[in-house]
Image (cartoon, rainbow, N blue to C red):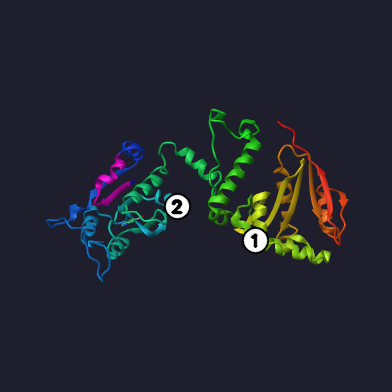
Amino acid sequence: MRLDYLTIFPDYLAPLTLSLPGKAVSGGLIEVHVHDLRRWTHDRHRTVDDTPYGGGAGMVMKPEPFGEAFDELAIDGATIVVPTPSGRPLTQALARELATRERLVFCCGRYEGIDQRVLDHAAERGELIEVSLGDYVLNGGEVAALAVTEAVVRLLPGFMGNAESLTEESHEAGLLEYPSYTKPAVWRDREVPPVLLSGDHGAIARWRRQQSLDRTAARRPDLLHGAQAAGEWVIASAVPADAPELLTLQLACWVTEALVNDDLSIPPLHEGLADVEASVRDWDVYVVRVAGRLVGSVRGRVVDDEPTVWEIGRLMAAPDLRGRGLGRVLLEHIERAAPPTVQRFRLFTGLHSEANLRRYKRAGYRVVATHDGPSGPVVLEKPQRRAPRT
Ligand code: JB8
């Protein structure tokens, strides 16, 4: 791959001849040419900018130096990469796309940007891709050009260590990385999560997957909502931002429950956003999303003064998705989330919720008590059965 850079600060791109790309250069994988744009000026001041037509603040980069540079460098057929805050966001997908090209020509702007005709002209002579590093403003395109270069060059076949990058792609695509730990096992009173020392590879894989999901839900919910395959359920710990959707789901579910039981006094029906936010704080709450939509939830916590009992509640599945096993998945998930001290699971349901009672009984629960009131509730319990340690 051949890489050209047009810039008024060639020193800024000196890192390209060092370190990572440096190895690719010496290995013959890439060819790097950094050009001082002022080489294609002809006045005493080597002017590259001028005032904007139509007025306004700042200066605009003149078209002629770029045009002459394009001619001399014979950019025809190349991919012209122009960093700008209004470009396509740089993603791994875009980096992969650029890594397939034979020649990239980076045009690094300064000031308020480049005369639009340079971009229109470039698009006619090659492939123009305007790229943004993200929603913030740099002083010029150089840092963005460096970032694009590093993201692209490490993907080239034959670049050192890119066997790893292939596995990195296939693994937990679309999710944030789980946290990693190395020796010592205790450092400044901080312990490595015990599961990582257990030797239980299945448990480790499940823990890492859950960490990835939790982090993604908390830090980058946009990834969870966008990147998952159609129809795939993603379970993650609830975050406070889930409260409005949780409240909506709760109302949808408990209205049905209230109608079935002919009992409008059911407490969840009368909760507000603050109650749901408190629930997310005080319980282990999990939510299930399908293509971004919150379609299910469940919560669990150790009962006060009964550390061997894990109370499960608010098992909810969107009414339009009933009968697809979502409730069972949530129940199994919240049972697995119980801490090791737990010996029994406990949950409550309405006396007249025949369908619920049947489902819970099938899952191994037995009625242990029936409370007064128009519709129960019924208390069900099930002994904890731990998978034997391997
Ligand atoms: C002038 O924030 B940026 C960026 C900012 C710029 C130019 C290019 C890129 C040119 N300001 O990605």
Residue type, numbered disc 2 = Thr
Q: Quadrant of residue 251?
A: bottom right
Q: Quadrant of ligand 1?
A: bottom left
Which badge, 1 or 2, is on the more N-terminal residue?
2
Identity of the residue furthest to the top in this view: 184
Residue at the limit of the structure toward the front, as seen here: 305
Q: Give, as a three-letter code, the residue at label 1.
A: Leu
In the picture, the disc for residue 343 is none
Q: Are marks 1 and 2 in contact (CB under 8 Å)?
A: no
The image position of residue 241, as x and y in percent, is: 59, 56
Magenta stretch bounds:
2-17
Is 321 left, or right, of 170 in this rendering?
A: right
Q: Is residue 73 located in the magenta-colored stretch of the structure? A: no
- Crowding at dot 2, Cα within 10 Å, few <14 / some 14-19 / many 20+, comes out as some
Question: Ligand 1 closer than 8 Å to the CB at disc 1?
Answer: no
Could you tell me which secondary element the residue under label 2 belongs to?
A: loop
Residue at image coords 29%, 61%: 112
Q: Nearer the viewer, mark 1 or mark 2?
A: 1
Which circle marks residue 91 in the picture?
2
Query: Which residue is depicted at the point 23% across and 62% down?
Result: 63
Q: Secondary structure at mark 1?
A: helix
